[in-house]
Image: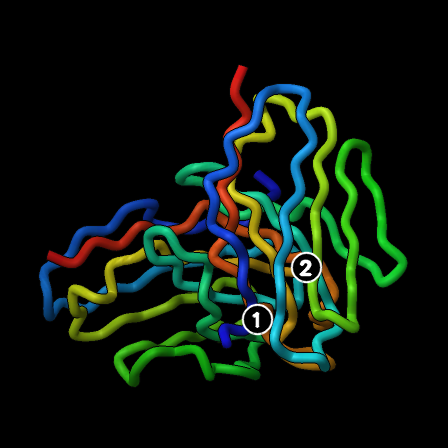
Amino acid sequence: GAGVSQSPRYKVAKRGQDVALRCDPISGHVSLFWYQQALGQGPEFLTYFQNEAQLDKSGLPSDRFFAERPEGSVSTLKIQRTQQEDSAVYLCASSLQQYSNQPQHFGDGTRLSIL
Amino acid sequence: RKEVEQDPGPFNVPEGATVAFNCTYSNSASQSFFWYRQDCRKEPKLLMSVYSSGNEDGRFTAQLNRASQYISLLIRDSKLSDSATYLCVVNRNSGNTPLVFGKGTRLSVIA
């Protein structure tokens, strides 16, 4: 399809394991965003890429969270030594241009459960 | 004060009713404003951008009051399919800065 694609849709991991979440943005979209959404909350900004450059990572909750977009297209969000509080839906969004007045198109999200 | 605040609801309204949601934001330098809609266990989808002069899209009208730092969304002639969570979204500061989402207002339209 032509939308933002995320995988896996669901991920269950034991506390302490590392996980990697993938985002495939809409082709040609310059900007890519990662958000974390806890139950009953709105999405919380994690990090932002313009092409391959990570311009803002102020929302990453700890140094266990790492994101990359090495070729300016697909992005991976990695969480090391997962904790129970990491359980949430991780949403990826992309937009055509770099400006924050551009609409963002979201993927279905990855629902992460840490046991 | 939280960056973006919304009444979480739920708002339970009958079909055909008119319903309005308000949202307040804390940073007077914010320049980009949106309403997103999120269905249960689905991703957020852009409903409409909000412009200073106010804008309308069919049954939906959005207004921005910069002086009071609030944004509103009016839905006329509510349909069952309007049932969803409505997220108020503001950019954190002027320029190209991250978007900040409110917690959302839940709407249930009842037959």
A76 left or right of B33 in image: left
Chain under callout 2: A
SS state under label 1: loop
Q: Foreground: A73 or B20?
A: B20
Snapshot quadrant of residue A80: bottom left
Asked whether residue A97 is in view, the answer is no
Q: Is residue A13 above or below residue B68?
A: above
The residues tagged by marks 1 and 2 sit, at their Cα atoms, a distance apart of 10 Å
Snapshot quadrant of residue B64: bottom right
Q: Is residue B108 above or below residue B42?
A: above
The tag earlier along the polypeptide, 1 or 2, is 2
| Numbered circles on residues, count | 2
From the image, tell me which residue sits under label 2. A28
From the image, tell me which residue sits under label 1. A72
Q: Position of residue B46 (x, y in %)?
A: 65, 48
Snapshot quadrant of residue B61: top right
Colour scheme of the rendered structure: rainbow
Asked whether residue B51 is in view, the answer is yes
Q: Position of residue A3 (x, y in %)?
A: 58, 45
A108 left or right of A106 in image: left
Residue drawn at 10 percent across, 60 percent down? A14
Q: Foreground: A11 or B60?
A: B60
